[in-house]
Image (tube, rainbow, N blue to C red):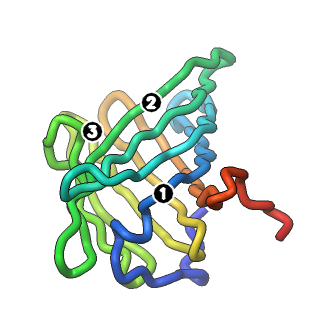
Amino acid sequence: MTDHGRMYPVRDAAAYLAGHWIIHRTVIDELSGTEGSFAGTAEFRPADDELLELESGEFEWGGVTNRASRSHRLVPRADGTADVLFADGRPFHDLDLRTGHWSTRHPCAADLYDGEFTVVARNEWHLRWRVSGPAKTQLLTSVYRRIPSTGRPPNPAA
């Protein structure tokens, strides 16, 4: 999913992410071979001195589709980077898109999340999480495409 050949440097992560995005995500459980998908939207909106990320959509797993949502807080730093927090304020990871690519890591109980962010265009970025632990080995691959101010998703053929 991540294409290191196409990277779009971003001077300010919060300014770049602000707005509405369409999300397409695949989830692969590498132990069982089960595959799932998420289709939805993300909104990064101002909340005091932070951005609140609100993600919602439909998650299909094992032939069952359910509504799914999550939220994070993005705390901008003066140098254009940011700290990403869970909704309750616990630290999640750091984010630096100034080269167009960022790798990060988050230990979560017995699991380890290795994340890779790649900005490929002004209106598109990719996120890949590899989760490894005693009970799961998963690969989550997401494509985010900005929703233009018209409210319609971008035309992929354009």
Q: Nearer the viewer, residue 152 or 58?
A: 152
Q: Tag 3: Cα neighbours inside 10 Å, few (<14), some, or many (≥20)? A: some
Q: Earlier in the sequence, mark 2 or mark 1?
A: 1
Per the image, the residue denoted by label 1 is 19
**Secondary structure category for the residue under label 2:** strand
Per the image, the residue denoted by label 3 is 111
Say which of marks 1 and 3 sits in front: 1
Task: Report, in whole angstroms, how far the alpha carbon at label 1 lies from the one at label 3.
Answer: 31 Å
Figure quadrant of residue 70? top left
Q: Are marks 1 and 3 in contact (CB under 8 Å)?
A: no
Q: Are marks 3 and 2 in contact (CB under 8 Å)?
A: no
Say which of marks 3 and 2 sits in front: 2
Task: Report, in whole angstroms, how far the alpha carbon at label 2 lies from the one at label 1.
Answer: 17 Å
Q: Which three-letter amino acid code belongs to the residue tagged 1?
A: Gly
For residue 110, above or below residue 141: above
Residue at image point 22% right, 39% down? 108
Task: Report, in whole angstroms, how far the alpha carbon at label 3 lies from the one at label 2.
Answer: 21 Å
Per the image, the residue denoted by label 2 is 69
